[in-house]
Image (cartoon, rainbow, N blue to C red):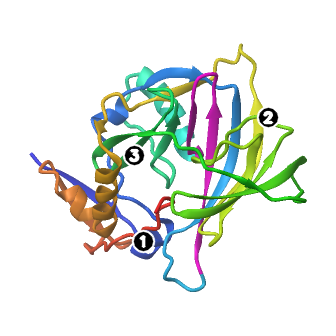
Amino acid sequence: MRKTIIIMALLGQMISMNAQVRVFSALDREPGITIDFTKYRINYDMKYVNDTTRCPLSFVTEPMVLEIGDKSTKFYSFDKCRSDSINRELIKKGESNLTTGGRISWILHRDYPQKGYYMLLDELGMERYACHERIKEPTWTLVPDSLTDIIGYSCHLATTTYRGRTWFAWFSEDIPISYGPWKLTGLPGLILRAYDTEHHYQFETTGLKQYDASSKIPIDYKGTEYEEIDKATLNKQYVRYYADPVGFVSNNPNVKVIVKDEHGNPTKMNGIPYNPIER
């Protein structure tokens, strides 16, 4: 029997928010495994542009979180982090009605399951993908005589051309952690602010916290049963999905998608703007 997924949404709002056709799969009900424990948690606001053809540009803001452990890091949506925490408790109780949250569906692990590699997990419709990629850190150029204050920390500026964009990053040597948002790493201090030259992607730290060893706040990994996919193939899947998200989901023989507007009337959902952080 085909399952019917009814998406109730005002299409204009869906496009402006980069809403996806979110569908739970059996893998979403798996609790995941603990791979590390959080030593530092850094919160960022990620401000980004979906549709680069609009003038003036329209921005979306997503709260993100960077979890840093002894052996690995994890960067993902804070709302997804919160829903994952709720779902862990629901799964323990044997419940099946899980929550979903966040506009950003991807999760970026560093140094897990293999040291020296990134693992990108993402969901497109009912598909769950795991993309393994060797870490290649940016080559930074320090900007002399640059100094600013961000959340009380003295910061210096560096710049790099990386993954198809030119980036500026403010980092603080007062926090000697060579990490930052997304794949922006390798400076002699934590990156507290970063943006590309077009300001399509902007990261701003909103808070950070250090935990002691007794806190035992888990860093979880849910990709053990995901379909492994190489980067080139995953990029092709993104292009297909964003061009026709309903068609992508409906391609699954067990799913039929019906999109309805805010009045409950059947309607069409066109492509979603696609402006990836990597070009």
Q: Which mark is residue 122?
A: 3
Q: Does the magenta stretch include residue 54?
A: no
- Quarter that holds the N terminus: top left
Mark 2 or mark 3, which has the lower sequence index?
3
Residue type indicated by callout 1: Pro
Residue drawn at the location 54% of the way across and 32% of the way down? 85
Q: Residue 273 carries which label?
A: 1
Q: What stretch is highlighted in magenta?
A: 57-78
Q: In which quarter of the image is residue 238?
A: bottom left
How crowded pointer 1 is (Cα within 10 Å; few <14, some 14-19, many 20+) is rated as some
Tell me if residue 99 comes above or below residue 37 in the rendering: below
Q: Distance between the residues labelled 3 and 1?
A: 18 Å
Q: Distance between the residues labelled 2 and 3?
A: 30 Å
- Near-viewer residue (153 or 91): 153
Mark 2 or mark 1, which has the lower sequence index?
2
Secondary structure of the magenta portion, mostly? Answer: strand
Please provide percent x and percent y for residue 215. 70, 18
Look at mark 2 in the image and give the residue it sits on.
176
| Relative horizontal placement of residue 183, taking residue 186 as reference (left or right) | left
Please provide percent x and percent y for residue 45. 67, 54
Residue type indicated by callout 2: Pro
Residue type indicated by callout 3: Asp
Provide the secondary structure element on which disc 3 rests: strand
How crowded pointer 3 is (Cα within 10 Å; few <14, some 14-19, many 20+) is rated as some
